[in-house]
Image (tube, helix red, strand yellow):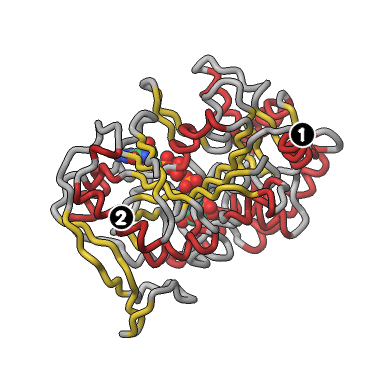
Amino acid sequence: MKVDVLLGLQWGDEGKGKIVDVLTPRYDYITRFQGGPNAGHTLEFNNIKHVLHTIPSGIFRENKINIIGNGVVIDPVIFKHEIEGIKKLGIDLTQNLLISKKAHLILPSHRILDSASEAAKGKAKIGSTLKGIGPTYMDKTGRNGLRVGDISANFKEKYNNLVAKHRQMLDKFYEFDYDITTYETEWFEGIEILKEFQLIDSEQYINDGMKAGKSVLAEGAQGTLLDIDFGSYPFVTSSNTVCAGACTGLGVAPNKIGEVIGIFKAYCTRVGMGPFPTELFDETGDLLRKNGNEFGATTGRERRCGWLDLVALKYSIMINGVTQLCMMKSDVMDNFDTIKICTAYKVNGKQVDYVPYEMTEDIEPVYSEFKGWNTDMSKMTNADEFPEAFKQYINFIEKETEVPIAVVSIGPNRAQTIKIEK
Ligand code: GDP
Ligand code: IMO
Ligand code: MG
């Protein structure tokens, strides 16, 4: 069996959590391969609305194994809160949630370093979620990090050594005021909670499972345009959010990747700083934000909104080798008279149809205009019901991207999902 990968093609928050939950019945293992609690993945079903940060979105389906892979970074405090929240719904996770021993730990001091780094950058700040993601991945690649597997032997000593180094940076370099003690106490409680779970060699577990016929879904976090290599650097996250990240973040070989399911909103959003060529600063942008309830699932921040950017979408499809698309949140534009799609950029007066080296603020989008469908689609159950103008919108995207749209999502609920049979 192969690993199917589901990942975001824009700047995150495309609706990955919802679709992973919808697809989970087809798979045996649901895995996360990168990122950490900077992610906020929302699921809605049976009058429950739940946001997951570290735990894979297959967790609410029975008899499924959920795995936090080696590429993920874990904050024990946030993990503890997640476990408590899910327990309240009557679900015991100790049997079906497995954690890689190679996943790195986000220390309380990593969070503080994240804040100190952002404060020092001033106006040039990234707009990080302040969850300590950047400093934790820096310690991972700098070969200083603490891993889940370390929590058994000499843990306190290893912890103290790393914190001492962080304190030097905070005191001497950043000259930053901080209090670590309250968060630290809860952090060690979180470590005890982690110990209740099966801490495994997940790369072996997943590969053995595949050999034995188990099917695997890999759930991306963030989105391709936030990838550390291919995103709008430096306004990116610190992990490889692209398909290749599933290989390194789970320990599966490239020839074991099956379908690559790319997920995008019918428009675009971004939270945090950095370029966004199709951003709208007018009432249309406000309407997208209002209709789409575009406020961050992790930080509550307002999401910036704009038209769909096909230049960026095609780039993401290329980098990931996307084989099928899911289009989300088209219902947000159900009451629009006209809708635009960006099909090219003008950079210094010259028209280009690819993403330039620097996705600077100076890019001028070139738009194609479409008639809105002006129909409430949120209760539709079948693609046959789609209005003509909506069909033209999705046909245009399929023709331009040369990838079929397999799923259209018309509302946040699990049930508001339409599969398109070709
Ligand atoms: P993720 O990070 O990719 O999992 O996405 P988020 O959960 O951060 O953000 C997506 C938001 O849109 C959540 O509030 C979802 O409940 C909601 N959502 C998902 N799909 C749809 C849809 O098709 N229509 C609408 N209106 N909301 C959706
Ligand atoms: P999900 O998985 C949207 C953004 C932050 C910031 C930049 C760097 O829910 O789609 P970081 O905390 O990673 O150092 O922040 O990346 N960002 C996200 N934006 N969705 C996410 O995750 C994000 N995770 C990080 O806003 O601009
Ligand atoms: Mg999110």
Q: Is disc 1 surrounded by few (<14), some (14 to 19) or many (20+) residues within 10 Å?
A: some
Q: Position of residue 422 (x, y in %)?
A: 39, 45
Left or right: 91 in relation to 94? left
Total count of labels: 2
Q: Which residue is mark 2?
A: 395
Left or right: 336 in relation to 271? left
Left or right: 407 in relation to 69? left
Residue behind label 1 places its C-beta within 8 angstroms of ligand 2: no
Q: Quadrant of the N terminus?
A: top right
The residue under the point 62% across, 22% down is 93
Helix, strand or loop at label 2? It is: helix
255 or 337: nearer the eye? 255
Q: Position of residue 141 (x, y in %)?
A: 72, 58
Q: Is residue 128 visible?
A: no
Q: Quadrant of residue 32?
A: top right
45 or 182: nearer the eye? 45
392 or 170: nearer the eye? 392
Q: Position of residue 235 (x, y in %)?
A: 49, 63
Q: CA distance from mark 2 to mark 1?
A: 45 Å
Q: Position of residue 107 (x, y in %)?
A: 66, 44
Q: Are marks 2 and 1 in contact (CB under 8 Å)?
A: no
Mark 1 or mark 2, which is nearer the start of the sequence?
1
Left or right: 421 in relation to 357? left
Q: Quadrant of residue 280?
A: bottom left
Q: Is disc 2 surrounded by few (<14), some (14 to 19) or many (20+) residues within 10 Å?
A: some
Q: Nearer the viewer, mark 2 or mark 1?
A: 2
| Label number found at residue 200 | 1
The residue under the point 26% across, 33% down is 380
